Image: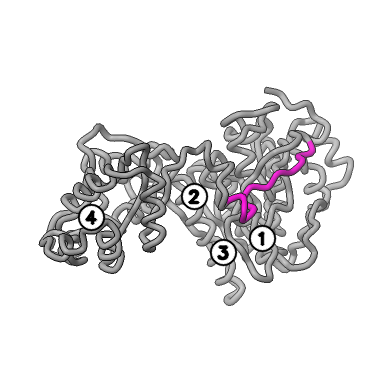
Amino acid sequence: MNKNSHTKPAEDDCHDKTAAPLQGVRVVDMSTVLMGPVATQVLGDYGADVIKVEPVEGDVMRHAGASRSPRMGSMYLANGRNKRSVVLDIKQPAGLAAVLRLCERADLFIHNVRPIAMARAGLGYADLRAVNPSIVYVAMVGYGSDGPYANQPAFDDIIQAGTGVSSLFMRASQTEPAFVPLTMADRITGLTAAHAAIAALFMRQRTGRGQAVEVPMFETMVQTVLGDHMGGQAFIPPAGDMGYERLLTAHRRPFRTLDGHIAATPYNDKQFRAFFAAIGHADELAHNPLMATQSQRARNYHEVYRQLADIFATRTTDEWLALCRAHEVPCMRVSAIDDLVDDPHLRSVGFFEETEHPQEGRIRQMRPSTRWSTADVSIRRQPPRVGEHSLEVLREAGYGEAELAAMLASGATVDGCTEAQPG
C-alpha cells in the first residue's frame, strides 16, 4: 500500500467481520472494453479501491448486451462491480492534471491503450513515475512493445486468429476456421494482468520500488495455446509434430446419447477399467491393444474417442450419468447457457446474487468464484453509472468546490449523480 493511500470504505459495505485481501490498495483504472475491466474487477473483488476513469461518454462496453437504461448493459454489469466511476476528459488540461493528482496517491495504474497513445497523452510510465516514484504501472497491450506487431490494434477475435485458436477447429474437425464464442483472449489476458499486478505490489512491499509491467494479449494467448500444443517442437531438433492428439481428434466432443448429449471422460486406467466393467466389457478392454493402458490410449486417441462415441449412443443421458457417477467417471450433462441460472449446484453454493441496484432495480450478479476462510471477497459496490463518483473522488484528492465547479463548467468532469444519462 502506498503510504499516501487513504482508501475510503465502501458506503454499502456491510462486511465488517473480516478484512479484504487488497484493502487499502488504490487503483487508478483507465482500462476499457473488456480485458482491462476484467483485471480490475478481480482487484476490486479482492478489496482494492478501484477508481475507474472514463471519458464523458463512458466505457464503450457499457453498451454491450441487454439493458434497461442507457450505458448500463449486461456485460458492463458483469464487470463493473466494486469500482467507482470518475469522468475525466484528459484532452483538457484540467482533466489530465486530475488523473495525475489521483496517481500521486495511487498504488497501481492500469490501462489497455496502446503505449504510444498513452505517452502522447502525458500518461506514460515516466509521466506517472515523476509524480509517484513507487507506483506500479500495468500496461495491457495487444503485442509486446519490442516486436514488429507492437503498434497494431488488437481485439479478441484478432488474437484468437493470430494465436492458432481459430485454426485448431480446422485441424480437429476439418471445418472452416472459427472463433470460440467467448471473449476468451480478453478474459485470459485480464486474469493474467490481475495476478501480475498483485505480484508487482507484493514485490514493491518487499523492495519499496514500483515498476512498469507489460501484459501482451498475443504472447499470453500463444503461451496458453502452445502449453497444450507445443508437441514435438518442445525439443531441438523437433521430436515430432506440434499438437496434442487428445484435444485434436474429431471425436473429442460431447457424446450423443439416445436422447441428448453427455460429456464423459474416463481418463486414467482406473476409470477406464471401472467404466468397461460397469457396461460388461472388462475383458474386451483388457485385450484391446489400442486402449487397455494409458500409454496405449495416448497413441490412439482418435480411435479411443470413436469407440466411446459408439458406446454412449446406446443408452439415455440419465442412464449414463447414473452409471458414470456410480463409478467415479467424470461426467456432466451438456447444459445450455439458459440452464445455468437454475443449476442446482450453483443455487446451492449461492453463486448468483440478486440485489437491488440504486438505478437499475433488481439485478442478478455472479459472486466472486473463490471462497476465503477469513477474508472478505465479495460484492461491496454495485456497478456505477458514468461519473457517479466524480465529485466524491476528486474531493478526496483535495479539490475544492470552486475547482470542481470550474471543471464541471468546462466539461473536464461530469457529476454522474445529477447528469442525465444519454443513450
Query: Is residue 356 one of those drawn in magenta?
Result: yes
Look at the numbered discs 2 and 1 and tell me whether their residues touch, using CB distance below 8 Å.
Answer: no
Q: Distance between the residues labelled 1 and 4?
A: 37 Å
Which quadrant holds the N terminus?
bottom right
Residue corresponding to mark 1: 377
Residue at point 41% right, 37% down? 181
Residue at label 3?
A: 198
Marks 3 and 1: in contact by CB < 8 Å?
no
* Label 2 Cα neighbours within 10 Å, binned few <14 / some 14-19 / many ≥20: many
Q: In which quarter of the image is the C terminus?
A: top right
Three-letter residue code for mark 1: Val
Earlier sequence position, callout 3 versus callout 2: 2
The span from disc 3 to disc 4 (Cα, nearest Å) is 32 Å
Secondary structure state at the residue bearing disc 2: strand
How far apart in space, not on screen, are marks 4 and 2 (Cα)?
Answer: 29 Å
Against 300, is 313 above or below?
A: above
Query: Does 400 sit left or right of 370 as displayed?
Result: right
Residue position for label 2: 140
CA distance separating discs 3 and 2: 14 Å
Q: What stretch is highlighted in magenta?
A: 346-358
Q: Is residue 324 magenta?
A: no
The disc at residue 244 is 4
Q: Nearer the viewer, mark 3 or mark 2?
A: 3
Q: What element carries label 3?
A: helix
Of the residues shown, which amino acid type is indicated by label 2? Met
Q: Which of marks 3 and 4 is in front?
A: 4
Q: Residue at x 79, y 55 (%)?
A: 13
